[in-house]
Each structure stands twice: as structure tokens, then as C-alpha cells.
Image (spheres, rainbow, N blue to C red):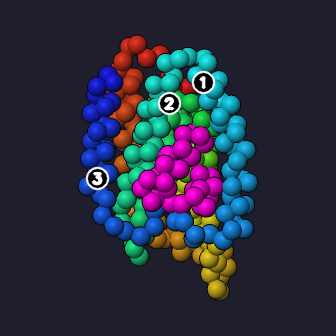
Amino acid sequence: MMKKVSQLIGLIVLLVMLSSKSVFAMHIMEGYLSPELSGLWFVIFLPFFVIGLLRMKKVVQENKQNKVFLALSGAFVFILSALKLPSVTGSTSHPTGVGLGTTMFGPSVMSVLGTICLLFQALFLAHGGLTTLGANAFSMAVVGPFVGYFVYKVARKLGVNMQVSIFLCACIADIATYFTTSLQLAMAYPDVENGIMGAAIKFLGVFMATQIPIAIIEGLLSVVLYNLIANNKEVEGVFK
């Protein structure tokens, strides 16, 4: 099973390499937010990160095998969110990869894994920035996982099967991330006539043309990876 998972991750890595041509903006770029807004998003995000650290420690204590799946979830987030796919007006869209790990460990743990991925991308790939890390982490590693997890839990309670529930979690988490990013950008650059909401609608219009199909593809990839994991009889109780 792990060999098949490694092959899938390798394929996604190849896609990252093939999509590495230069485009504008990846996450919210360095210096794009004012110091006040950057600090505000750090303050809002930090409690989720601390709670996530505590939850991650508990997850590892419950089952040592979870270390492998934490690493797998983190790698999935890092690779998918590093895909640079051109959007309209010179911006970019990308998957987030947080849905699968959310269904395995809950949204709090993804607050940590997602932030680690964003930090490494800012440091080594020039994707996003350090001053905007709080804003990027809040949208991708907090809002996305928590919204996705809510959708996942509702779907399971309604009797929806696991594959469809995971698809919905990954897909909605992706879109929720970009709703949040659009609002963050609108707060920094409000529309002259229509203010923050007017700007948020414009930013959403830029992102959604490419983000909706990307979210669907991400949901399908998450289901494929789930099937590879679930087919291993040695893996029990990983998914909630």
C-alpha cells in the first residue's frame, strides 16, 4: 500500500515541477498586507495553532502508527498547495490538500501541518511570505479544515458513504480557503465605490473561474489516496 501511495505522491511531485513556470502571487505574497493586518491575522490564527499542537501530541500518543499518516497528510498538503496554476488577471490558483488529513485527524491538527507547509514554501519556494504567514495559515490551515470537517461530519451523519464525504470535505475546504483569502485581500484593498464587500466579490470572481475545477480535482485525488490507504487491512481506525 505504501508503495502505491509513494507512486501517487511522486506523480503529484512531477505535476509540481511541470507547473513551475513564473506567474504572479502564490498565497498572499510578502508585503502585500499592511503591518496592522498582518499582525491581526497572526493573533487570530495563533490560538488554533497552539490547540493543534496539543491535539497532535495526543494523536501520536494514542497510536504510534499515526506518525506515518501525519507525515503523509503533511506531504499531501505541501505538494498540492505548491502547485502553481495560472488564473485570470495574472494571479494563481492552487489546491490546498487539507481535506484528507482533516478526515483522519480533525481540523486542529491540520492547523499545524498546514502552517508548517506554508512556512517551508515561503522560505524555500518563495510562495507566500513570512509577514503574511498568519493570514495564509488562517485561510488555508484553519478556515478550510474547519469548514471541510463540518461538511464531512454532516455528510456522515446523513449516511453519505466515506468516499463522497471525503470528496465533499476536500472540495469545500478548498473553496472556503479562497473565500477567506478574497475577504483578506478585500480588507487590505477595498473597492473605492463598494468597499470591502465589493472588493471581495471581485477577488472571488478572479479566483473561482479556476478554483472550482481545481477543488473538484482535489476532492477526487483525496478519494484516490483514501482508497489506497483503506485497502490496506493493517490500517484500522485511521479515518473518523
- Determine whether 13 is above or below 225 in the image: below
> Which residue is situated farthest in the front direction here?
123
Q: Which residue is mark 3?
A: 17
Q: Which residue is mark 2?
A: 70
Q: Secondary structure at mark 1?
A: helix
Q: CA distance from mark 2 to mark 1?
A: 9 Å
> Which residue is situated farthest in the top direction here?
234
Report x, y in % for residue 100. Answer: 47, 36
Residue type marked 1: Val
Residue type marked 3: Met
What's the magenta bit mostly, secondary-structure-wise? helix
- Report the magenta residues as a range: 110-139
- Determine whether 39 is above or below 197 in the image: above
Report x, y in % for residue 128. Answer: 50, 60
Position of the C terminus by quadrant: top right
> Which residue is situated farthest in the bottom direction here?
193
Give the label on residue 89, or none.
Answer: none
Position of the N terminus by quadrant: top left
Report the residue at 31% width, 59% height from top: 20
Q: Seen in the image, is 197 located left or right of residue 20?
A: right
First reached walking from the N terminus: tag 2 or tag 1? 1
Report x, y in % for residue 18. Answer: 26, 55
